[in-house]
Image: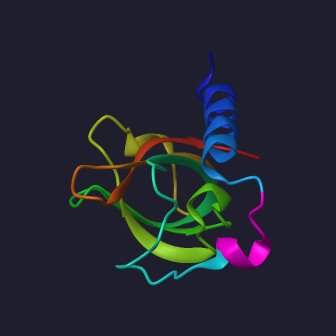
Amino acid sequence: MKLQTFTVIAAFATMLATVPAHTSEKDMRGSHGHKSMQTPSGTDEALAIGVINSINTETRSVNITHEPVESLGWPTMTMDMPVTRRVDLATVKTGEKVQFKLKKGRDKQFRIIGIEKTE
């Protein structure tokens, strides 16, 4: 199964499993500071769309401006995101629109575990 198809299905399933039936838009806003982001409990993975602003191969991170990530309760943000070793950063370039998959580590920090160029 293609990463894009899998990640869309996984994101939808995660969203259905983590959003209570009676959640209002106001309830989804929460606090969104970079270091203290609040995420719905039990949400450890998410899909997002964004544009790469810079790539740092030494620190294995990207600076990315992403669209809202509803399953995590995150608004549109620009942030530095660590990238796992299994992600080939040579497949993406600065300025490209990408779809990426996030996963929360044991240290409670989200990392990019998959990334691909999107239209």
- Residue 24 lies in the magenta stretch: yes
Instruction: Determine the residue positioned at 58% across, 79% down.
Output: 30
Using residue 117 as the reference point, say whether residue 119 is left or right of it.
right
Pick the front one: 87 or 54: 87
Using residue 115 as the reference point, say whether residue 9 is left or right of it.
right
Using residue 64 as the reference point, say whether residue 66 is left or right of it.
right
- Residue 26 visible in this rendered orientation of the protein: yes
Using residue 86 as the reference point, say whether residue 16 is left or right of it.
right
Q: In the rendered image, which quarter is residue 4 located in? A: top right
Instruction: Determine the residue positioned at 37% across, 79% down.
Output: 36
- Residue 96 visible in this rendered orientation of the protein: no
- What is the quadrant of the N terminus in the image? top right
Q: Position of residue 26 (x, y in %)?
A: 74, 79
Relative height, residue 25 to residue 10 (above, below): below
Q: Position of residue 98 (x, y in %)?
A: 62, 51
Instruction: Determine the residue positioned at 55% across, 48% down.
Output: 46
Relative height, residue 78 to residue 16 (above, below): below
Number of marks in the rendered image: 0
Q: Position of residue 28 (x, y in %)?
A: 67, 71
Relative height, residue 106 to residue 11 (above, below): below
| Residue at the extreme front | 22
Q: Position of residue 49 (x, y in %)?
A: 65, 55
- Residue 80 lies in the magenta stretch: no
Specify start and end residues of the magenta stretch as a single range. Answer: 22-28
